[in-house]
Amino acid sequence: MKTNAVLSYGANSPSRIAEVDLGEPRAGEILVRLVASGICHSDIVMKRVWDDFPGIAGKAPVVFGHEGAGVVEAVGPGVRRARVGDSVALSYASCRACPACLGGRPFYCDHFRALNYKGSRLDGSTTMSMDGSPVFGSFFGQSSFANHVVVNENNAVVVDPVCDPRVIAPFGCGVMTGAGAVFSTLGLRDGDSLAVFGAGGVGLSAVMAAKVAGVSTIIVVDPVEGRRSLATELGATHVFDPRRDEPVAAIRDLTRGGATSSLETSARADVVVQALDCLAAMGMCVALGFGTPEFPFTLSQVGRGRRLTSTNVGESDSHTMIPRLVEMHLAGELPVEKLVKSYPFAEFEKAVEDAESGVTIKPVLTFD
């Protein structure tokens, strides 16, 4: 079938919407008509580094996008997770057969890189083509910057059709990563304290989740006044402007020695160090910023049992975490709609521009 997709030709070339050929779903795959797709910072970064990314350099054009939401229009042989007509949220790809997946950790699937960053199916085939040549994609198993996608059924999570796809789309990555870091990686609970560096979509999702978890002290550090105000509305108990306040000293003073946990979402090396330095003894810093450069730190900064770690998608199994988050959303506990601004598919470049400038926290493309 024919469908439209955003084609990227490299870091220094403009993206364009063009018609491509989309193959039929194979065994275990489904065809999804997208209604919405979030734009994640990872999409923007990957366009910049795609030309040099290990194993995929030179593969162009490519279709990015990995926060899709839509409706199942066809299923391939053997599909069990979804039926035609189901509303679905799309998330990352995992094989569901390796030791990590069988052990309940699909977010650390042995084939995670190949399934999500290779630009094709695991066997090297592509779901899209144009004029007989391959169009690379299957980004996070999706490539959701398109009207239609063919994905493995394991990528799709059936959701209540009452949910607004524009709000549900970011659950597949950004919301799940921030919330999952709180619920799974850190396991926060009442009495803990959390310092969040960066009030973007991931950071604010963590704030909302921390409030649900009953975390008593939720601190947000961000230079943008509007984002600090929104953080307070969503559950932050304290906010600091790093241009005016010294975050580490302020957090240590507020928490009487240091926070029990911190999240870093900016991908800035100096901010990672601040997120580590603000911790109390045995505190954990989770660095979520994609593309963080190398940076030096001393053994004293990880002394007293402090830990620095990262996480894949908040250590979340999408088939259990997304329904949990949707339930919270429908109960009014996770008002993700306050982060979202919709853009017609034709305004893709404007949506990316607003994401990069910080004008919009979570831009979401909508499809006719």
Image (cartoon, helix red, strand yellow):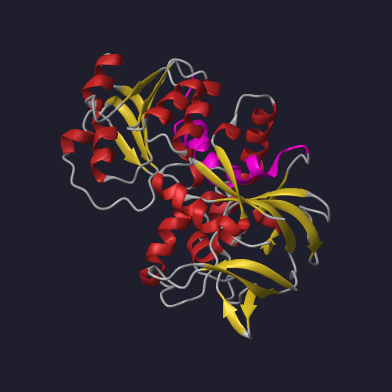
From the top left corner, tell me how far across and down residue 74 is, in percent: 81, 63
From the top left corner, tell me how far across and down residue 137 is, in percent: 56, 68
- Look at the image and give the residue range highlighted in magenta: 162-189
Q: Residue furthest right?
A: 84
Give the camera-side residue of 136 and 54: 136
**What residue do we see at 36% from left, 31% from top?**
262
From the top left corner, tell me how far across and down residue 356 is, in percent: 41, 49
Taking 289 as reference, is 367 left or right? right
**What residue do we see at 63% from left, 78% from top?**
129
User: Magenta includes 183?
Assistant: yes
- Compared with 334, 172 (above or below) is below
**What residue do we see at 40% from left, 43% from top?**
288
Give the camera-side residue of 60 and 225: 225
Examine the image and state in which quarter residue 220 appears.
top left
User: Magenta includes 235?
Assistant: no
**What residue do we see at 63% from left, 85% from top?**
131
Q: Is residue 200 visible?
A: yes
